[in-house]
Image: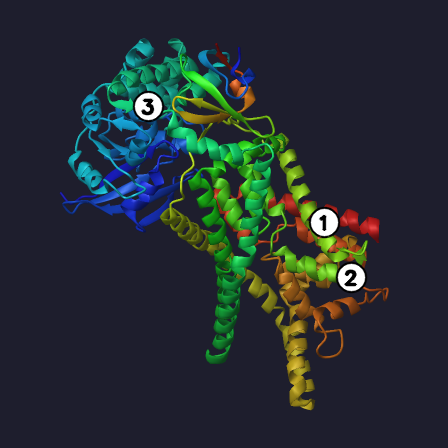
Amino acid sequence: MTSTIKIALVGNPNTGKSTLFNILTGLNQKIGNFPGITVDKKLGYCKLPGGRQAEIIDLPGTYSLYPKSRDERIAFQVLADSTNPSYPDLVVVIADATNLRRNLLLYTQVADLGLPVLLALNMTDMAKKEGIDINVDKLSERLGVQVVPISARSNQGIDKLKAAIVNTTMATQLAGADMDHLAPGALQHTRELLQTDHTYLCLQVLHQHEHLGRYTELEHEALEEIKRTNDFDASKLQAAETIARYRYLSSVLSGVVVDTGAKRKFAFSDKIDAVLTNRFWGFIIFFLILFFIFNAIFSWSTFPMDLIEGGFGWLTEYGHEHLPEGLLTDLFLDGILAGLGGIVIFIPQIAILFAFISILEDTGYMARVTFMMDKIMRKFGLSGKSVVPMIGSLACAVPSIMSARNIENWKDRIITIMVSPLVSCSARLPVYTLLISLIIPEKMLFGFINLQGLTLMGMYLISIIAAILVAWVMKIIIKAKEKSYFIMELPVYRMPRWKNVIFTMYEKSRTFVFEAGKVIIAISIVLWVLATYGPPERFAAIDRKYEQIEAQKIETEIATLERDRSAEKLENSYAGILGHVLEPMIKPLGFDWKIGIALVTSFAAREAFVGTMATIYSVEGGEEGTTIRSKMLAARNPDTGLPVFTFATGFSLMLFYAFAMQCMSTVAVVFRETKTWKWPIIQIIYMTALAYVASLIAYQLLK
Amino acid sequence: MKLSQLTPGQSGTIVEFTDLEMSVKLIEMGCLPGEVVEVERIAPLGDPIAIRVAGYQLCLRKTEASVIIIE
C-alpha cells in the first residue's frame, strides 16, 4: 500500500506533543485553517518505514474530549466526526509518564470512540529519574493497544513509534469503563437514531452534537428530543463519566506504575518556586526579566533592522539606476518593494520576542507569571496571560498579538488583542521624539530630571493607562459565552528545548510574512498610488513649472529643486488632496492639511510621519541644510502668522499618534488572529475615535 | 471546610463539591472525591492558590477552590 495514512496527535497540554510533532515532521509542516474558527490547523508530513507517507495533524492540547475553550473543541470535532476532512486513520495519544493517570483520562475517551489508537509514553526517562517505574508490557496488555515509551526531548524511541504506527491497522483496544449505565435509555435511542453500536460515540454526540456539522437540522432536533425525554443532565453525567474513568484507570494502573520517589519528585521545582513566586522577590524578578526582554527586543534588533532597511534602500536605489525608467519600475520599487521592506523589517523583533516567549513557556516560568499576575489583570477584564502581550507591545504590537494565542479564554484573548495596539510601540518613538523636541524646552527639572525625557515617559504611561481602561470597558461590553476559568496546571521547571525555540522563531516569522504580508503589500500599493498620482493636469503644470526654472538654474541647485518638485507633487497627489479634504475635520484638533497628508500616509505605518513631514516641509523653510526640526519650527499658519507647531498642536498630535490605529501590519495580524474583519474594523473605529476625542480635548484646552 | 480556607502546608481529603459545573472541570483535572489535596502556596497578591493533587501541581482561583469541600 502506498496511500498516505492520516494520523492525529492528541494529548494533554505540557506533554511534549508539539516537540514530538516537530521531530516527526521536521520542517515539513504547513499551517492551515479549520473552517470558521480561529485555531490554526498544524499539518506535517513524515516518511514511515516501508515507504509509506504519513500526514500528521497536531490537535490542540486538551485534558479531555469535553472542551474548556473553543480551541480544545477541535479535538472532539475531528475525532468524533468521520465526515470531517481531518478524520484520522489512526490516533496517537501522547501521555506524560510522570503523571500517567490524569493523562490517560483522555486516552480512555479517545479509545472508546473506536478509532485505531496507540499510546506514546513520553518523558519515560524523566519518570525513571523521578522514581516512577512503568511496566509498559503490562500496560499494553491491559489496554489492548501498543504502548511505545519515547522521549521526545532526547529523541528516543521515535523509530519504534514509527514502526508501531505502521503496525497499527485496526482498533484493538479493550473495552474500558462501562458507559452504557450512565444513561441507558438515551443511549439506546441514540444508537438507533444514528444506526451505530458505538456507545461512547453516542454519548459524546448527545453532549456536543451542536458542534458537529454532519447532522441535519432534523437529526439535531431528534437528539435534543432524546435528551429531553430521558432527563439528560450533561454536567452530572460528565462528572459521573470522569469518576468512572478514573476508577477504571486506578485498576489498570495498579501494579503497572510503581512510584518510589513521589516525595523528592517536586523538591527542585518547589525550591525554585519559593523564590520565583515569592511575595517580594517574585515581582522584582519578573520585572527584571521583562526589562531584559524588552531591552533585548530593542537593542538586539537594531543591527538586523538597520541591515534590512539599508538593504532595501540599496535595492531600491540600485533598481532605479539600472531598471528602465517608467511606471512599472516605480510600482515595483516604490510600491511592492517598499511594502515588502515594511514586512521584513518586523522579522527581527518577532523572532526575538518569540524566542523569549518560547523559553519562558518551555521552562514553566510563564505559568508562574500567569499565577502571580492573574489577580490584577482579572480586575480589568484581562487574564494573567495578557501580561506578556501587553508588555511586548511596548516594542511592537504585531508579535504580541500573535502571542496572545496562549490565552485560552476567548474573551480574555480578544480584549488583549484589542488593547495591545494602544500600548506605545517603538514605531511611535520617532514621532514622539520629533514632536517633543519641537514643543518641550530642553530644560532640567530640579537640576537632574530631563523635561523632554519626562514627557516621553509620560506618553508611554498615558498609553498603558488607556489600554487598561479600554480593557475594563470592553470587559463590561463584550459578552462571553464561556465562563472564565483559571484551573491550570503548574508544570515542573525544566530546561528549555533549544530546537523548539528555533522552530517557534521560524514558524512565527514565516506565518507573519505569509499571512499578514499579503494585506500589507496590497495596502502599500494603494498608498503608493495615492501619494504618487494626482489629477494629470495638475502634475503636468508642476512639471512645466520646474522645467522652466531648471533651465535657468545651475547644476548644484537642481538637487534642491528636485526635492521641491516632489514635495509639490505630493501636495497635489491624491494623498495631498485627501489631506485638504480632511482639513476641516482635523482643524479642531489643531492640524492643518500638511499634517493631514502625514495622517494619510502614516495610516500604513506611523514611522511614515517623519518622512512625510520631511518631504512636505522641504517646500518651505528656506535655506539648504536645515533639519526637518528647524523647518517645522519655522512653519507659520498663513492666516494668523503664528507658529503651526505650538504646544497645543504638538501635544494634540502626539496624543493622536498614541491612540490612533495607524499600522496596517497590526490590522493585518488582528485579522489573521481573529479570522474575521469584525475585530480589526471595531479596533480601527474605536482607536480613531479615541484619538480624535483625546486630541480634540487636549487642543481645545491648551490652545 | 472549604479548600480555600486552608493555609499553605495544610492538606485535606476532598469530600464533595458545591457547584456542579465547576466540579466537572475539577474532577477532570484529577480533583476526585477521596483525593488528598495540599495547599502549596498562595500567589503574592493572595489569589490564586497552588495546590498539590494527584501527583502534580494545579493552580486555581479562590472562588474555584471554595466549591471544594474537604475534611
Q: Measured from the top left, where is residue A561 in percent x and y?
A: 67, 81
Please give the residue where the numbered disc 3 appears in the rendered image.
Answer: A101
| Residue type, mark 1 in image | Gly
Quarter occupied by the C terminus of chain A: bottom right
Q: Which amino acid lies under the numbered mark 2 shown in the image of this protein?
A: Glu
Q: Which residue is mark 2?
A: A442
Q: Please tell me whether mark 2 sits on a helix, a strand or a loop.
A: loop
Q: Tell me if residue A90 can be seen.
A: yes
Q: Secondary structure at mark 3?
A: helix
Closer to the camera: disc 1 or disc 3?
Answer: 3
- Of residue A11 and residue A181, the one placed in the foreground of this image is A11
Quadrant housing residue A127? top left
What is the C-alpha distance between the residues marked 2 and 1? 16 Å
Nearer the N terminus, badge 3 or badge 2? 3
Disc 3 to disc 2, C-alpha distance = 66 Å
* Three-letter amino acid code of the residue under disc 3: Arg
Q: Is residue A599 above or below residue A470?
A: below
In this rendering, is residue A501 above or below A306?
above
Chain designation of label 1? A
Q: Are marks 1 and 3 on the same chain?
A: yes
Mark 2 belongs to chain: A
Residue beneath label 1, please?
A: A458
Q: Nearer the viewer, residue A50 or A114?
A: A50
Residue drawn at (45%, 37%) of the image: A364
Alpha carbon distance from label 1 to label 3: 53 Å
Residue A609: image x %, image y %? 65, 61
- Name the residue rendered at 26%, 25% in the picture: A111
